[in-house]
Amino acid sequence: MTSTAPPATAKAPPRRRRSRWSWAWVALSSLAIAGYFTGQYAQGTLDALAERHVGLADSYASQATVIRAAFYVHIVTAGLALALGPWQFCRRLRTRRVRVHRGIGRAYLVSVALGSVSAFVMSMFSSVGLLGFFGFGSLAVLWGWTAWRGYRAIRERDVPSHQAWMIRNFALTYAAVTLRLWFGVLILAQVPFAHGPDPFPAILAQAYAPLPFLCWLPNIVIAESMIRRRGLPALHLTAPPARSAAPGG
């Protein structure tokens, strides 16, 4: 008699394993940064934080009440969107817990709506002036617009377009993470060339200056590349060529 060997345990294909690792990194980094900046501004009033030069407190502590309110709205809603966003791309949640997926999606979209409006208000008072207004202001407008397009697509039951727009949208949400990554890289890049008794304030200013654009432009390029690889509806700078009619059509 010939013995039958037990079936080997099926392993996930390399592409799926890479996808899981990528999702884990995005989820963990998003949660870490969301917890960091919300906790950072929960340690006291803006005036108290400004005295300690905490984050952006210096730029907004002296502003009118409505601007300070927009600042706190943005911190809370952007943090919530960043924490919720990765779970919308969890395949198991989308396929097995549809109601949970929809509930998280609604909370995410409301957070982005409030966060984008408050971010645009904040951009008018950026510490880097017009560069901050145009950079962060464009980010705020695109953040809200892509969320609207994603919402409209799913209301029309256009799932592929919904997925494409939400990939773009979360790429903009993830700017909160990439901003801090770029900030660290640009600071370290300047350290070997620093001179003078106290070069750190100049290093910080120069590292922060390009971030209004640098924090999100690469993200949206990567997002569009992902959309094309997955065969989802991509954006085109020019109109795609018209398909020729089939013979006899």
Image (cartoon, grey):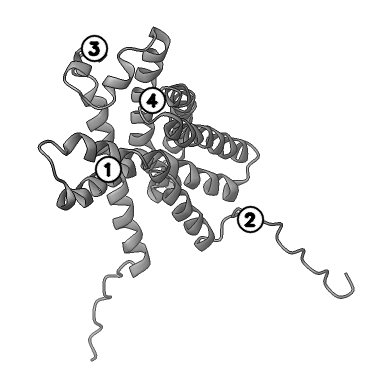
Earlier sequence position, callout 1 versus callout 3: 3
Looking at the image, residue 243 sits to the left or right of residue 67; the answer is: right
Cβ atoms at labels 1 and 3 below 8 Å apart: no
Identify the residue at image location x=27%, y=43%: 183
Give the CA separation, mark 3 to mark 2. Answer: 47 Å
Q: Is residue 156 above or below residue 164?
A: above
Q: Which residue is mark 3?
A: 47
Q: Which residue is mark 1?
A: 183
Residue type at mark 1: give it.
Phe
Disc 4 crowd, CA 10 A, few/some/many (<14, 14-19, 20+): many
Earlier sequence position, callout 1 versus callout 2: 1
Residue type at mark 2: give it.
His
Q: Nearer the viewer, mark 3 or mark 4?
A: 3
Give the CA separation, mark 2 to mark 4. Answer: 31 Å
Under circle 1, the secondary element is helix
Cβ atoms at labels 1 and 2 below 8 Å apart: no
Under circle 4, the secondary element is helix
Residue type at mark 4: give it.
Thr
Q: Residue furthest bottom?
A: 1
Earlier sequence position, callout 3 versus callout 2: 3
Q: Which residue is mark 4?
A: 77
